[in-house]
Amino acid sequence: MITKHVWLAAVILAFTALSLNAGTILAPEQDKGWPMKGHDNSDNHFSPLSQINTDTVGRLGLSWYLDLPDERAALEATPISVDGVLYFPGSGSVVYAVDAVTGKLLWQHDPEVWKNIQPEQLRTVFRANRGVAYGDGKIVVATNDGRLQGLDAKTGELLWNVRTFPQDQNYFSAGVPRVFKDKVIIGNGGADWGNRGFVTAFDLKTGKQLWRFYTVPGSPEDNAGDPVMEMAAKTWSGEYWKTGTGGTVWHGITYDEKLDRLYIGTGNSGPYNPSVRSPGDGDNLFLVSIVALEPDTGKYIWHYQVNPREAWDYKATADILLADLEIDGRIRPVLMQAPTNGFFYVIDRETGKLISAEKTGKVTWAERIDVATGHPVEAANIRFENGEMTVWPGALGGHNWQAMSFSPQTGLSYIPYMQAGTHLKVNPDQLVGGVSLNFVIEDEQDGKGKLLAWDPVSQKLRWSVQRTTMWNGGVISTAGNLVLQGTEEGIFEIFNAETGEKLWSFNANQGIISAPITYSVAGKQYISLLVGYGGSSAATGNFNKTYWKYGEPRRLLTFALDANIALPESSKEASTQAFLDDDNLVIDEDAVVSGAALFGEKGCSMCHGINLKSVGAQAPDLRGSAIALSKDALGTFLRSDAAARYGMPRFSEITDDQVNSLYMYIRAGAKEALGQRESGAEAEGASRL
């Protein structure tokens, strides 16, 4: 077998020039997987594979696909590829193992999240999962309800199971565990409810907890004797540990092999209004920060705070990318991040000092970032002076969790950019953050996105691709001089990494928000991508353009050169939504107003869409729901756990009057959508990112 492979390699090399010109014969490459979320510890989402390149990409076709009929919500995960097997989680933390060449399902592990918590708790458990980790023959998954599980990579057998946060608190897990050395680290979400952020490291072999680092201080008693928490507490005031803090680490964690340290990105405040959570002054460390830690002990090294005294639901939880860049004539080890606040940051990863930061798009909350101090120069009257404000970027950000990429080949970062404003208004009764959020569309670019090619050294845009939609997929780049991204509209596209020229596209018949991967098996390069729309796009219902476009199953798609199978012909495409109405129903206008308020207070908009305008996932549009056409059926359903398996909470406390209010609000909304009623009450929305 070895002799045969050597002989084949010699033959192919003898015809290298001819094969490259003709584009018909490919030199075999060493098998390379995609063993972690960002491909390697740099988290750059860059692959060294080049078999699929600018010359050959035109021959790319669908090799196989796998339907995922049990998946009804967002597929946000970046798959990983290890030893010829693809691993990825579904929206409910179900882990799949699939043959990377044939698409055969090898095993499946269901942690049955809905059975392990009370249905009421599903209100604060975000039904999404962005990936699994691999190490030492194990697949590690963080379940939505706060368990970390180690699975045998070959069989899916559960090897260990540990809790990562208290079950009775409003935390949730949607992030990707990070394996480093002999450990695995995970954070969680829940800052919007005021929960205190932290990350926890566990032993990869046994699941035993090794250390925990809190990202914000606790009570004076909790902080006593901890110099880092005592230092951070000096930037807070009042009884902040009672009013709420935030700062959860729900996505960006990167391990630096060169310097042997971890970088964690922390989230937004909770409550958002700083005068409520921490009256007076103070930066409120370590909210919206990048924090460097010793990986063996969790000991603090340095921090850089992106948004001191955070007030707009901004987060530094995006990917943290590592590179060595030539800046001012010398090579510097840097980290790069495009957090939600609209700037692109380049930071010295040895010292934590800011090197540069520039706006990637529309930003109104700050004029610039002062490089000397590292602090933003905020715009006038941009906080809660008058109890409300409108800012760009909005709470979804100029860039969110969707993967961005850095190519050492081109020296460019590729960013899935988006634009929309947010109007924030103080509202003590609001479920999330004590502030109501509604998204704002003012200019022609709002509600749309772009693919940006950004030069991190000059801090300038090299090229961009305009998108008609906003909540698009993650990005990867390759040594084949390619950039790959899927869109909200369900189109998977490949571009020239240097010029932005579109080279290839494929209609996936389903919206895309995850990032693709590329890997090789037996010398053949493949590209795989999960397709399935949803997630925080629920907040974009007011300007989402694609909900009714596709109804195809969620799938795993895999492509290769000279493959040519086709997806089944779409049978569910429709141009209009089937709203339901009762012609004989008389609308109670007072109930509509109270129903709109209740819809926001109960957090319904987080899944069913702001102002009833759902994007189809996380949950259906209630204006077209047969259950919501009957008040009795709606009440019975809300008080049951009939759909707990799919993430629907139970509202056992809801009264008959409240059911009637929600019913009237939904029915009025359906009549408005059908043009039988003028626009009326709107629920104040909330982000849940």
Image (spheres, helix red, strand yellow):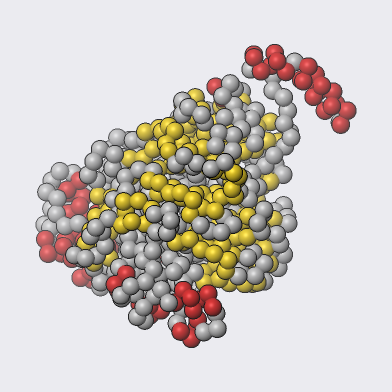
Q: Position of residue 508 (x, y in %)?
A: 46, 34
Q: Is residue 673 above or below residue 486?
A: below
Identity of the residue drawn at 51% across and 63% down: 303
Residue 298 falls left or right of residue 251: right
One can see residue 325 in this view: yes
| Foreground of the two, 380 or 123 | 380
Task: Measuring from the top left, give residue 463's x and y in whole percent.
Answer: 43, 32
Who's the residue at 45% across and 82% down the image? 219
Q: In the visual, does 90 lie left or right of 181?
A: left
- Comparing 69 with 381, the one in front is 381
Please identify the quarter of the rendering in which residue 7 is found. Answer: top right
270 versus 258 height, above or below: below
Residue at image point 49% right, 51% down: 355
Q: Quadrant of the C terminus?
A: bottom left
Question: Which quadrant is home to the N terminus?
Answer: top right
Q: Residue furthest right?
A: 3
User: Can you give x and y, in whole percent of width and height, for residue 667 in the image?
Assistant: 20, 55
